[in-house]
Image (cartoon, rainbow, N blue to C red):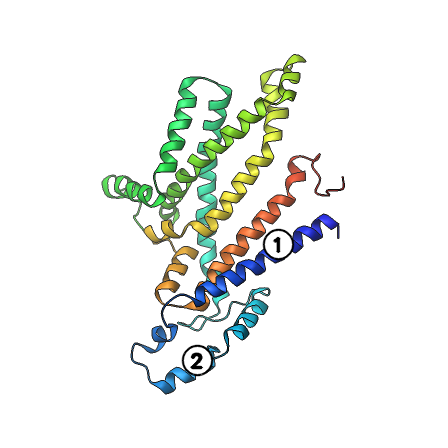
C-alpha cells in the first residue's frame, strides 16, 4: 500500500475513533432514563434490574465504552431499546429515503448554482452579477425550515400541486428536495463564482489569450478544468452535510429518512438508536470526504497524493 494511502487511511480511522468517542459520551450525558421509556414511569425494582442486566446497562461506563468501540468498527450498533431490533437494520431501512432526498437536492442545487455563477463570471454585466449576489444573499439569510414552510404554503396549500408531507411517490419528494436544493444552491453560487473569478485572474489565462486562444477554448480546456477540484470538493462536502443535516427538513415534511429516525429516537430516549444513527451519519461524512480526496487525480492527473513527488 502506498505511504500516502496508508497515511490517509490512518487519519480516517483516527477521526472515526474520535467521532465515536464523542458521540458515546455525549449520549451518556443526555438527561433522562431510557428504561422509563420501556417500563413506564412507575416500574418495579425487579423489572429495572432485570432489564439493566439484559441490556448491559449495569456495566461500568469504561466497559460499555470499550464494547461500543469494538462493535463500532464492525458496524454493530446494538439493539434498539424500544423494539429490540438491530439498530443497523433500522438505519438501512430509512437510509434510501435520505439518499434519494440528498441526491435530488444536490441535482437541484447544481442546476441552479452552476449556470448562475458561470453567467455572473463570464458575462461580466451588472444584471447577472447582481442576480447572483441577491440570490445567494437571500438564500443564505433564509433558514431552510422557513423556506420549507413557504413552499408548503404556496405549492401545497394555495396551488395544491404537491402533498404537504409523507412519502409514496415522486410528488412527495419535490418540496423537501426543493427546500434543501434552493438553500444549498445559494451557497454553491457564491463559492463557484469565487472559484471561477480567481481562476480567471491566473497568469495562464493571460498567456492563453496572448496566444490567440478563444475565450470558449480557454474556459473549456483550462479554467473549468482547474476549477473542477475546488468545486467538486465543495459539492462533496455539502453532500456529506446534507446526509447528516437534513433532520429539520425531514421533520417538517414527515419524510421517512434518517433525520426522522433520529428525532424519534431522541424523543423515546433510545440511546443505542441515537448513537447508531449519529455515528452512521458521521462515518458517512468522513468516508465521503476520504473518497473525494482520492478522486483529485481523476479531475487533474498532474496532482499526486504522494508528498515526495
Q: Residue at x 57, y 67 (%)?
A: 69
Which sits in the foreground, 61 or 252?
A: 61
Which sits in the foreground, 45 or 131?
A: 45
Residue 220 sits above or below residue 37 on the image: above
Residue 296 screen position, x and y as percent: 64, 40
Q: Is residue 45 left or right of residue 22?
A: left
Query: Dot 1 corresponds to which residue?
Result: 12
Residue 200 screen position, x and y as percent: 57, 22
User: How many numbered marks are there?
Assistant: 2
Q: Residue at x 62, y 54 (%)?
A: 12
Pick whichever of labels 2 and 1 is earlier in the sequence: 1
Query: Dot 2 corresponds to which residue?
Result: 52
Q: Residue at x 50, y 73 (%)?
A: 61
Quadrant position of the C terminus in the picture: top right
> What SS does tag 1 mark?
helix
Residue 106 sits above or below residue 217 on the image: below
Amino acid at each position: 500500500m502506498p505511504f500516502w494511502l496508508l497515511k490517509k487511511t490512518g487519519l480516517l480511522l483516527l477521526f472515526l475513533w474520535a467521532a465515536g468517542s464523542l458521540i458515546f459520551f455525549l449520549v451518556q450525558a443526555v438527561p433522562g432514563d431510557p428504561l422509563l421509556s420501556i417500563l413506564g414511569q412507575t416500574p418495579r425494582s425487579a423489572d429495572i434490574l432485570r432489564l439493566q442486566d439484559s441490556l448491559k446497562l449495569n456495566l461500568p461506563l469504561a466497559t460499555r465504552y470499550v464494547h461500543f468501540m469494538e462493535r463500532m468498527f464492525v458496524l454493530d450498533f446494538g439493539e434498539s431499546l424500544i423494539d429490540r431490533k438491530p439498530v443497523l437494520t433500522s438505519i438501512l431501512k430509512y437510509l434510501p429515503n435520505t439518499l434519494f432526498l440528498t441526491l435530488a437536492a444536490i441535482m437541484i442545487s447544481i442546476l441552479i448554482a452552476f449556470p448562475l455563477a458561470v453567467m455572473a463570471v463570464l458575462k461580466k454585466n451588472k444584471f447577472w452579477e447582481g442576480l447572483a449576489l441577491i440570490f445567494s444573499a437571500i438564500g443564505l439569510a433564509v433558514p431552510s425550515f422557513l423556506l420549507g414552510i413557504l413552499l408548503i404554503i404556496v405549492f401545497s396549500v394555495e396551488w395544491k400541486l404537491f402533498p404537504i408531507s409523507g412519502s409514496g411517490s415522486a410528488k412527495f419528494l419535490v418540496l423537501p428536495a426543493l427546500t434543501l436544493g434552493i438553500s444549498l444552491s445559494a451557497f454553491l453560487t457564491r463559492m463557484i463564482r469565487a472559484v471561477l473569478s480567481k481562476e480567471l485572474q491566473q497568469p495562464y489565462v493571460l498567456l492563453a489569450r496572448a496566444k490567440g486562444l478563444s475565450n470558449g477554448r480557454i474556459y473549456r480546456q483550462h479554467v473549468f478544468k482547474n476549477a473542477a477540484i475546488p468545486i467538486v470538493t465543495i459539492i462533496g462536502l455539502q453532500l456529506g452535510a446534507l446526509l447528516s443535516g437534513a433532520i429539520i427538513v425531514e421533520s417538517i415534511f414527515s419524510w421517512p429518512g434518517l433525520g426522522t429516525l433520529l428525532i424519534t429516537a431522541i424523543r423515546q430516549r433510545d440511546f443505542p438508536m441515537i448513537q447508531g444513527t449519529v455515528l452512521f451519519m458521521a462515518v458517512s461524512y468522513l468516508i465521503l470526504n476520504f473518497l473525494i480526496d482520492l478522486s483529485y487525480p481523476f479531475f487533474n492527473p498532474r496532482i499526486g497524493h504522494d508528498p515526495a513527488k
